[in-house]
Image (spheres, rainbow, N blue to C red):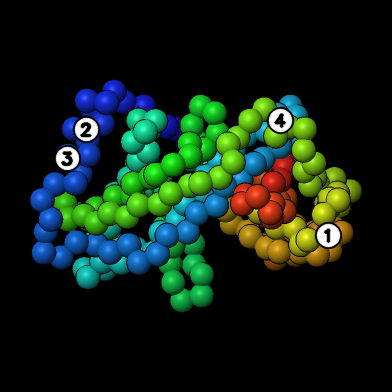
Amino acid sequence: MKQRQLSGLVVSGLLALILGACTAAPPRIEGVSWEVFRILSPDSGSVREELSLFIRAEDDDGRADLEELYLLHPESRLYWRLFPETWEERTRGNTTWTGSSGFSGVEGVPRGEYLLVLLDRAGERTEERIFIDLPPFSASAADEEYPRLVRQGPVFLIDSSESEPCYILGQDTEGRVLVSAETVQGSFDPREYTQNEAGTNLEWYVFVSDSRGWYRGSGPY
């Protein structure tokens, strides 16, 4: 996902614009869910860090009225802007969550406070703040152990030293997560997750939960 970096003056102006006068019926952010992922590239051996963030957004005029979602990190002067055409929607139980993955700065995910701003078509807005307080990302992350996938015909073998369950993600070429599953098996067949041959055309990742507060994994495969 493309990041934007602005001068302090422009950041102030942007904040003033999207945080303008309150209106009578703004949209609502009823929940925020975020995770940090450290991902080993099986080809280069390099490790990158990304933020995945989703909100449970509601609007009295219907979800179709939601127009823009901003994620700002004032300290680093970075911000990201999502539209209905670029954000993802995921269903959890009876609720819909809106957001995206792949948020990252030059040196991993910036720590500290983030500001979320949700706007609808009438320009009405609401905001929420989150704080990411995790140990910093460093080059030493490449020296850690990461679960891997090993192709064996149509099946992947899961190579992991962890006793905890692994999480399998399947993404399309645009980075949208189409498959998300937990497994304790030593292998998995993509066709079982997608119920058809299309599963062989996705990019696959494998992760384990790290006790330090993030997910460690590798991909794409």
37 versus 40 height, above or below: below
Closer-to-camera residue (50/177): 50
Q: Earlier in the sequence, mark 2 or mark 4?
A: 2
Label 4 belongs to which residue? Answer: 140
Identified at 51% across, 27% down, the residue is 106
Label 3 belongs to which residue? Answer: 17
Amino acid at dot 4: Ser
Q: Earlier in the sequence, mark 3 or mark 4?
A: 3
Identified at 37% across, 33% down, the residue is 75
Amino acid at dot 2: Ser
Q: CA distance from mark 2 to mark 4?
A: 35 Å
x, y percentage for residue 93?
A: 51, 75
Query: What is the quadrant of the C terminus in the image?
Result: top right
What label does residue 12 carry, if any? 2
x, y percentage for residue 58?
A: 30, 67
Label 1 belongs to which residue? Answer: 163
SS under mark 3: helix
Residues at discs 3 and 2 in contact (Cβ within 8 Å): no
Q: Comparing marks 3 and 2, which lies closer to the viewer?
A: 2
Q: CA distance from mark 3 to mark 1?
A: 49 Å
